[in-house]
């Protein structure tokens, strides 16, 4: 958990021995799962029309998650033509195309942890019981054990007081049970566009949810998460490109190994593919996805446990960081976890020398002396460092 007013060192250890830069393949156990190439990092979009697949491909999206009333044979054909992978429900058409490499996983419902509708005008009942999710998971696995099963959970993963869970509000102990019913764990919370003051503007809830999923799965399952980039239901607020970049990198730094953009919008009017109608956001997301794809071999390498110590001169702004090594180079990915300014000091283990530290994508460098360098962070800033 992130605690305000504390200096925290957040260095996460993924699979693999500390200090090794051998790639981490989380999907090797599934013959027909996500691509196993080291340069593949899942960057997905949620519940979109396959007719737009080519446009999303240009934006750096490589995967669809969920299909409206699908999959159908036509939807799968459209995605295949665009070179787009998909995680979809295991319906009749899906199983009939079980030999199609376009399908890389099965979708196991959405937000079963939320209160469930009893029908129009009839209110809501309790969430689906975790045992039912596990039963469904076993059926999906029995029908096709060659692909992973993705379960997407709601904002209760990050926010215990989420009233949308009904009678199970403030029961986080449910989640380790839900996670027994999936191979890939995912969740969504959208703080920039949130309408509740406890969450609104607190981007760190995204990181908190990822961190909890990693903990609840004991680091044994891939963790993905959804990212906001539209107004959703908020008529006055939405994430800025800067905030979207922050949410993406704080997710990765805290253990997310797959991203799912939520691009629907209901205000001022319904727009299923609102990202495609927002030139500035689309440009920013495209550049962000291109950067992640370029760093995929690094991101798919093990995190170096204890690779760096990080301190902040503003106690109210902890800096979260992650250290990777790849092809003889060291990478430090860092994000300011609050919306205020600070100066961070990084002390690198096993790199006691001096030299120049490149700040990726910013056309600048900082100087390292005796394995230590400092840098300034603005509100929700992200800095990515490469050291020869």
Image (cartoon, rainbow, N blue to C red):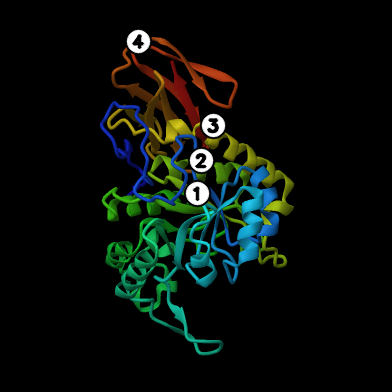
- Residue on which disc 4 sits: 353
Residue bearing the label numbered 3: 294
- In the rendering, at what x and y percent does residue 386 appear? 46, 22
Q: Position of residue 321 (x, y in %)?
A: 39, 34
Q: Secondary structure at mark 2?
A: loop
Q: Is residue 356 left or right of residue 275?
A: left
Earlier residue among tags 3 and 2: 3
- Ranked by sequence position, the earlier of labels 2 and 1 is 1
Q: Residue at x 39, y 61 (%)?
A: 159
Which residue lies under the disc numbered 1? Answer: 259
Residue at (58%, 25%) from the top-left corner?
A: 362
The disc at residue 380 is 2
**What element does badge 1 sit on?**
strand
Please tell me whether residue 154 is drawn above or below residue 36 in the rendered image.
below
| Tag 4 secondary structure | loop
Q: Nearer the viewer, mark 1 or mark 4?
A: 1
């Amino acid at each position: 958990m992130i605690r305000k007013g504390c200096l925290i060192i957040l260095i996460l250890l993924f699979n693999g021995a500390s200090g090794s830069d051998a790639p981490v393949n989380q999907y090797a156990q599934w013959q027909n799962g996500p691509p196993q190439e080291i340069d593949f990092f899942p960057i997905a979009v949620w519940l979109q029309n396959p007719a737009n697949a080519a446009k999303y491909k240009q934006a750096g999206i490589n995967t669809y998650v969920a299909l409206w009333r699908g999959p159908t044979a036509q939807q799968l054909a459209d995605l295949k033509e665009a070179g787009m992978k998909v995680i979809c429900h295991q319906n009749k058409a899906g199983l009939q195309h079980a030999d199609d490499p376009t399908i890389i996983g099965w979708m196991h419902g959405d937000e079963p942890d939320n209160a469930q509708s009893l029908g129009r005008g009839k209110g809501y009942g309790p969430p689906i019981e975790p045992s039912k999710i596990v039963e469904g998971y076993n059926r999906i696995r029995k029908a096709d054990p060659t692909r992973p099963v993705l379960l997407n959970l709601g904002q209760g993963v990050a926010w215990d007081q989420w009233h949308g869970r009904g009678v199970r509000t403030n029961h986080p102990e449910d989640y380790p049970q839900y996670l027994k019913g999936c191979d890939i764990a995912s969740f969504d919370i959208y703080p920039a566009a949130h309408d509740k003051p406890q969450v609104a503007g607190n981007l760190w809830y995204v990181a908190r949810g990822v961190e909890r999923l990693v903990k609840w799965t004991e680091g044994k399952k891939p963790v993905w998460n959804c990212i906001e980039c539209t107004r959703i239901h908020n008529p006055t607020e939405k994430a800025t490109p800067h905030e979207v970049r922050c949410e993406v990198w704080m997710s990765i730094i805290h253990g997310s190994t797959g991203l799912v953009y939520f691009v629907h919008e209901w205000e001022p009017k319904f727009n299923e593919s609102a990202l495609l109608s927002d030139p500035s956001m689309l440009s920013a997301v495209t550049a962000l996805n291109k950067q992640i794809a370029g760093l995929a071999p690094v991101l798919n390498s093990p995190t170096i446990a204890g690779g760096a110590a990080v301190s902040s001169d503003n106690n109210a702004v902890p800096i979260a960081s992650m250290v990777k090594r790849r092809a003889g180079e060291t990478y430090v990915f860092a994000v300011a976890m609050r919306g205020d300014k600070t100066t961070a000091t990084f002390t690198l283990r096993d790199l006691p020398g001096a030299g120049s530290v490149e700040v990726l994508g910013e056309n600048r460098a900082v100087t390292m002396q005796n394995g230590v360098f400092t840098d300034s962070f603005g509100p929700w800033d992200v800095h990515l460092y490469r050291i020869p």
